[in-house]
Amino acid sequence: MVTLADVARHAGVSASTVSYVLSGKRSISASTRERVNRSIEELGYRPHAGARALASSRSDIIALMVPLRTDIYVPVMLQIAMAVTTTARAHGYDVLLLTGEEGPDAVRRVEGSAVADAMIVMDVELDDERLPLLREAQRPAVLIGLPSDTTGVSCVDLDFEAAGALCVEHLAGLGHRQIAFVGEAPGVYERRTGFAERTLAGLRAACDAHGLRLLHRPCGIGWSAVDATLGRILEERPGTTAFVVQNEAATDPLLALLRQRRLAVPEDVSVVAVCPDQVAERASVPLTSVAVPAQEMGRRAVEQVVAVLDGREAAGTVLLPPELTVRASSGPAPR
Amino acid sequence: MVTLADVARHAGVSASTVSYVLSGKRSISASTRERVNRSIEELGYRPHAGARALASSRSDIIALMVPLRTDIYVPVMLQIAMAVTTTARAHGYDVLLLTGEEGPDAVRRVEGSAVADAMIVMDVELDDERLPLLREAQRPAVLIGLPSDTTGVSCVDLDFEAAGALCVEHLAGLGHRQIAFVGEAPGVYERRTGFAERTLAGLRAACDAHGLRLLHRPCGIGWSAVDATLGRILEERPGTTAFVVQNEAATDPLLALLRQRRLAVPEDVSVVAVCPDQVAERASVPLTSVAVPAQEMGRRAVEQVVAVLDGREAAGTVLLPPELTVRASSGPAPR
DNA sequence: TTGAAAGCGCTAACAT
DNA sequence: ATGTTAGCGCTTTCAA
């Protein structure tokens, strides 16, 4: 293995000079820098991550906690994870993957063993059990999601309440009076995952404000679950003319089942989804949707932790404003 | 920060004793062990990962290289990644997430800086450019996938050739004579991703052996792409009575589009998929399928690298035998 | 069964 | 602008 000492010898300088060439933390004459860099190149030197971590108490690693569950938002999760990883790399950090399964223990582990300099936590519940630990942690943490109490932590998330409201306003503007909300799987609400409840809250408030009726039905995964949910909705509220869907696994089945029931989209019923643009574009009827900006969320989360690690100010909580894109699935309410 | 020295002092033993209690590498009297463990507990001691890595030249981290692309098998990727992470944790390893984007550079980085003890590489191309580096690497590597030349590397994968053959045999047994293969996105073939080509090879060989006709059409992502592909197939080969699908994003649209064209599944046409069981079960018509054992693949990959890291023998290449489950989407060929 | 002590490869004062 | 040197916290020989 090639060490920094090897490089120093080869370049005829001291170890610290090599170190400083690498870190840029003090000025080095052009000639020395060049010589050192050539030696590094020639010897194929790479700093030893562990040694560096020990000496500098910086691991250049960001831990990312991803939910293990599969009842939820798979592509969104992957998109976020990927955005986190690429953004982190761009800032010189690697990403350590932790599963939500480990829960608070993972936080302790990361904190105690100094494997990572910071944490990004996904799939946040309103009253998340990892929260107290993160608050008193020495290292910066950013949640992707929004707990009920955000004191002492930074969060990045879509403003799901505003997203819900936006859906209602769009539909109200088109003359719809009865809306059904096809939500996430029941488990997601039972766990009190923030985004699901917040969308619902936004929908409710806006429906009240506009005098619309709202029916909320969680919806499990799989064709038959969607079919059952749709059946119940149409039976309970035959006057429903619009659906808001926040459930990645349900959008396509829903469109197909509506077609099967001879309900044309958007002529008979309108559908508005809360999902990534990619999903909306690829649906059988391109969906009018409020985008879940997964990439943006991942990117912002990394930029926040990096800012703190670089000694700049933490941005606190950032709620991204929702954007609704009109596509083919929404139209005037039938009369 | 609590260090090993703190623990030693607190327990009234030497540093090495604490270290040995932790590693179990030499026998310790029950009483000392107990005392040390109590001190560890009381002080809330966690070994510093960097220090440990430096002293032992073991980071207890496994690097996992995941493709960044989204034109491919998203749930499968996530399932594998999760299985890798949980299995790794069970063996005391953490997982470092690398994106395929970095390509060979990532291999060099991991290798040179000793961030990870081993690598698991996904989305392997037949003639992968990371392969030469992996072969001469000091650290064990396992590919999830199968390149054309497997010398000097370990691989774990489903036997996709056998999977293709299995599909054909099932359909041939049901009396089908003309099969269409709805494959992955064109890009997947252009990159020469092994599994896609191998399934095709298996299908071809088996069709030849059984005297069936096969039509292969790659299929892009999105409803319209599937529609176009289906249109072309039915036009070119109106006698098609069975579809084999290996494209996660295309299965559900395909079923819906067949329905739309008044082709009943399985009465008019049969559909056999190559996908995770979860996907097959949840489709609008539960799909007869050859399972892609994502979890199993992730698990096996980790177990292989861990075996090598523990000084046991490497298992070389493991091709998992395919299993076909008959569900509702396949039936006798119409006459 | 336990301790002492020499590093592991790097960073960052402290010198010059 | 560069060199010297004392650790960072742990593992592991070597001794007892």
Image (tube, coloured by chain):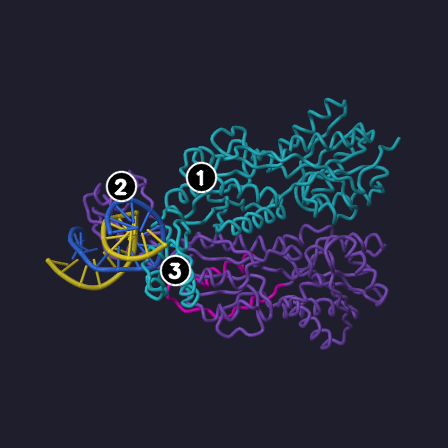
Chain colours: A purple, B cyan, C yellow, D blue
Mark 3 vs mark 2: give the one in front: 3
**Image: magenta residue range:** A294-323
Q: Judge by depth and name the residue closer to the eye, A324 or A7.
A: A7
Mark 1 lies on residue: B311
- The chain that hosts pointer 3 is B
Instruction: Please say whether residue A295 is one of the residues in the magenta stretch.
Output: yes
| Mark 3 element type | helix
- The percent coordinates of residue A288 (x first, y second) are 69, 59
User: Marks 3/1: CA distance?
Assistant: 30 Å
Q: Residues within 10 Å of mark 3 (few under 14, many from 20)?
A: some
Mark 3 lies on residue: B32
Q: Residues within 10 Å of mark 2 (few under 14, many from 20)?
A: some
Mark 2 vs mark 1: give the one in front: 1
Upstream in the sequence, badge 3 or badge 1?
3
Asked if the residues shown at circle 3 and circle 1 are in contact, with their CB atoms under 8 angstroms apart, the answer is: no
Instruction: Please say whether residue B174 is one of the residues in the magenta stretch.
Output: no
Task: Tell me the number on the disc at residue A38.
Answer: 2
Please state, as top left, top right, bottom left or bottom right, where the C terminus of chain B lies in the image. top right
- The percent coordinates of residue A181 (x first, y second) are 74, 65
Q: Residue at coordinates 65% horizontally, 32% vertically from top-left?
A: B199
- The chain that hosts pointer 2 is A
| Mark 1 element type | loop
Amino acid type indicated by mark 3: Thr
